[in-house]
Image (spheres, rainbow, N blue to C red):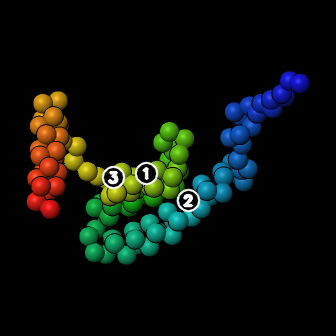
Amino acid sequence: MDEIEVRIHKEIKDFKERYYGLTFREWLTLIIVLIINVPLYLFGIKLIGDDAMSYIVIVFAFIIGGIGLGKINGMYFEQIYKYIVRQYFFLNKPLPYKTDEMLLEEERLKNEKKKYKKIKK
């Protein structure tokens, strides 16, 4: 018997329910940006002035918005974060360059040490 293959088109897989034109993730990011940036701007104006504070608020909005809304290679930030942590904290080992001669020399020295340990016992 032949096997039946069910094909799902890409558009159907990428479907997300929208509320007033935005997904739940986009609404949540928008609310978080407003909760952080509005008080930051209102209280920051008194400390450092209007112009400098507006630039700081813009930077914070871009950072939070990029984390909440941005997609890189089809993955959101929380998916990319796992790979970043793994790469830079757990797999961060220097990769030394060794020629074939250097590898052969290391192997010869290991064998000599093994022979010496056998003789010593």
Dot 1 or dot 2: first in sequence order is 2
Q: Quadrant of residue 40?
A: bottom left
Q: Is residue 120 above or below residue 39?
A: above
- The N terminus lies in which quarter of the figure? top right
Q: Secondary structure at mark 1?
A: helix
Q: Give the tally of numbered discs.
A: 3
Amino acid type of the residue tagged 1 in the rendering: Tyr
- The numbered dot on residue 91 is 3
Viewer-side residue, 16 vs 94: 94
* Amino acid type assigned to the residue bearing label 3 in the image: Leu
The alpha-carbon separation of the residues under discs 3 and 1 comes to 10 Å
Q: Are marks 1 and 2 in contact (CB under 8 Å)?
A: no
The disc, 3 or 2, on the residue closer to the chain's N-terminal end is 2
Q: Position of residue 84 (x, y in %)?
A: 39, 52
Q: Residue at x 73, y 50 (%)?
A: 17
Q: CA distance from mark 3 to mark 2?
A: 35 Å
Name the amino acid, label 2: Leu
Closer to the eye: label 1 or 2: 1
Query: Residue 4's spot in the image, x, y percent?
Result: 84, 28
* Place of residue 67 in the rendered image (x, y in percent of width and height, measured from the top left): 47, 55
Write down the residue under mark 2. 30
Residue 39, how many percent across, how many down? 44, 73
Q: Residues within 10 Å of mark 2 (few under 14, many from 20)?
A: some
**Pick the front one: 9 or 96:** 96
What secondary structure is marked by label 3? loop
Checking the image for residue 83, the label placed there is 1
User: Could you tell me if residue 24 is visible in this image?
Assistant: yes
Label 1 crowding class (10 Å Cα cut-off): few <14, some 14-19, many 20+?
Answer: few
> Which of 42 and 112 lies nearest the eye of the viewer?
112
